[in-house]
Amino acid sequence: MGCSKWRAAFNFGHLKVQSKLSVFLTMIILFVYLFYCLNGFCESLPRPVYDQRARRQDEHEPKDAPSFVREQLPDVADSTNNISIANTFGSKKFPQTIIIGVKKGGTRALLEFLRIHPDVRAVGSEPHFFDRFYDKGLDWYRNLMPRTLDGQITMEKTPSYFITKEAPRRVFAMSRHTKLIVVVRDPVTRAVSDYTQTVSKSPGLPSFRDLAFRNATTGLIDTAWSAVRIGIYAKHLENWLRYFPLSRFLFVSGERLVTDPAGEMGRVQDFLGLKRVVTDKHFYFNQTKGFPCLKKPEGSSRPRCLGKSKGRPHPHIPSDVLLRLRDFYRPFNLKFYQMTGQNFGWDDTA
């Protein structure tokens, strides 16, 4: 009986010691925590994951954002904690700039040169929304666009827009503030280049002469042939000027894009309100292809040139056919110079 009392007293005393020790350790921890907080170290302590996510949503998520937008909002860097969080966030927007033409003028080269710029995001393929797929709706079109951050420009290029009658009204309905870039080239050379591309896909095509003339005897040009019709730039521009002022356009010389790519890119970047990042240091002239290529990026083993479909050798076209075409285009070219305030010098070519 005495032993039992002794054991009970011992256990009770032991528990009292443990309790006092626990209280003492707790007080030390609280004291250390308060000391660090008073000295400004609490903010550097890691927060629970759910707490970090809640803070990011409260600080960065728009209050009126619909649920499907909120689900796509990514993690952002917490400026208070200076935590660097990798992200690929952004939003899909309608293009602020569209390269609307012209086919075989140099639109692909221009787009590839522009994509070097860190503030330009562009669709790689041609959407053809305003000429072929308009019935799919604007939401479908916007979803094709790449995600962009604030300060970046969304772009696309579809050269057939320039000659599509409905395209100006449709683009205007999307945004009257859209900037429009037209890459133009000597219409005679452009027509030959167009024919070269077509005949490479359809080897059984009639000769250029047979397609260019409605009547070979009279020498009457067939304006129904698309290779000829596209080069009547003044006519197509009139359609666009019904909706957009001239100030919304930039006309890029396809010839100067070859002979002086940095100079033309300077004009383009100024027009878009971008810093001149793409300069002559990015280009070299490829003698084999006959046009400029981009120098190889860091970490790449080779430079970037346009594909085999670019720079094809043109077939021989009889000189009388070319002269007749030049005579046909001359009045349209002069009118185009007057409309744009630029002399592209095509009629100086013999």
Image (spheres, rainbow, N blue to C red):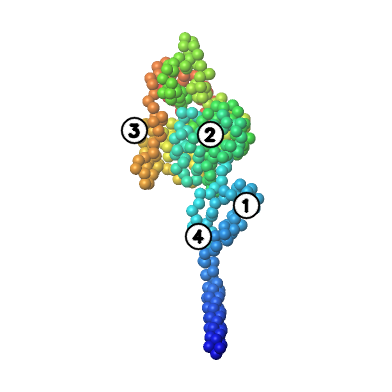
> Which residue shows up at 37% across the image and 42% down it?
296
Provide the residue designation for mark 2: 127
Q: Is residue 232 at least partly visible in the picture?
A: yes
Q: Nearer the viewer, residue 58 or 100?
A: 58
Provide the residue designation for mark 1: 62
Q: Nearer the viewer, mark 3 or mark 1?
A: 1
Residue 56 appears at what percent x and percent y? Answer: 57, 57
> Which residue shows up at 63% across the image and 48% down it?
67
> Which residue shows up at 41% across the image and 20% down it?
203
Q: In the current view of this chain or complex, which residue is farthest to the front?
A: 1
Does residue 243 sit above or below 298 in this rendering? above
Under circle 2, the secondary element is loop
In the drawing, does residue 130 fall left or right of residue 311? Answer: right
The mark found on residue 83 in the picture is 4
- Amino acid type of the residue that numbered disc 1 sits on in the rendered structure: Pro
Q: Reading the chain from its start, which is encountered first: label 2 or label 4?
A: 4
- Amino acid type of the residue that numbered disc 3 sits on in the rendered structure: Gln
The mark found on residue 25 in the picture is none
Residue 289 appears at what percent x and percent y? Answer: 36, 31
Whole-angstrom CA distance, mark 3 to mark 1, is 53 Å
Whole-angstrom CA distance, mark 2 to mark 4, is 39 Å
Provide the residue designation for mark 3: 287
Whole-angstrom CA distance, mark 1 to mark 2, is 30 Å
Under circle 3, the secondary element is loop
> Which residue shows up at 60% across the image and 28% down it?
166
Q: Badge 4, how many Cα within 10 Å: few under 14, some, many 20+?
A: few
Q: In the current view of this chain or complex, which residue is farthest to the right?
A: 64
